[in-house]
Amino acid sequence: MNFYIQQSIQINSIRIDGITNSSVLQIGSAGIIKPASYLYNTGGFTEPAPQAVQQTSQNGILEAPAVPLQAPIRG
């Protein structure tokens, strides 16, 4: 049986608390989502990565985003 779905989705605000390598964020309908996770050593690294540096202030709150974010673009 085939379903044909026509959608119109408007998202004014979305908050995602956490996402990992194998996470799937689905908005709307999709036929089949097959989870897949692939790890590649594209840089040819041979040693473990250095330990992460914690960027916290005295009260334990992050001073900067853990991941660099692009500035919003106004259209």
Image (cartoon, helix red, strand yellow):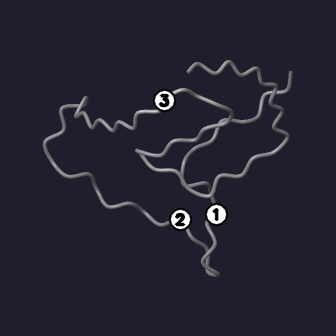
User: Residue at coordinates 57% horizontally, 70% vertically from top-left?
Assistant: 56
Residue tagged 2: 55
Q: Which mark is residue 63?
A: 1
Q: Which mark is residue 32?
A: 3
Q: Nearer the viewer, mark 3 or mark 2?
A: 3
Inter-mark Cα distance, 1 to 3: 40 Å
Question: Are the two marked residues, 1 and 2, in contact with CB atoms closer than 8 angstroms?
Answer: yes
- Which quadrant of the structure image shows residue 26? top right
Task: State whether residue 73 is above or below residue 14.
Answer: above
Percent across and percent down for residue 35 are: 39, 38
* Amino acid type, mark 3: Ile
Between 15 and 72, the one lying in front of the other is 15
**Side of 40 where 55 appears, left or right:** right
- Which quadrant of the structure image shows residue 64? bottom right
First-in-chain label (1 vs 3): 3
Report crowding for label 3: few under 14, some 14 to 19, many 20 or more residues within 10 A (C-alpha). Answer: few
Report crowding for label 2: few under 14, some 14 to 19, many 20 or more residues within 10 A (C-alpha). Answer: few
Inter-mark Cα distance, 1 to 2: 6 Å
**Quadrant of the snapshot with the N terminus:** top right
**Side of 35 where 62 appears, left or right:** right
Q: Nearer the viewer, mark 1 or mark 3?
A: 3
User: Residue at coordinates 80% horizontally, 30% vertically from top-left?
Assistant: 9
Percent across and percent down for residue 8 are: 82, 25
Q: Give the SS element for disc 2.
A: loop
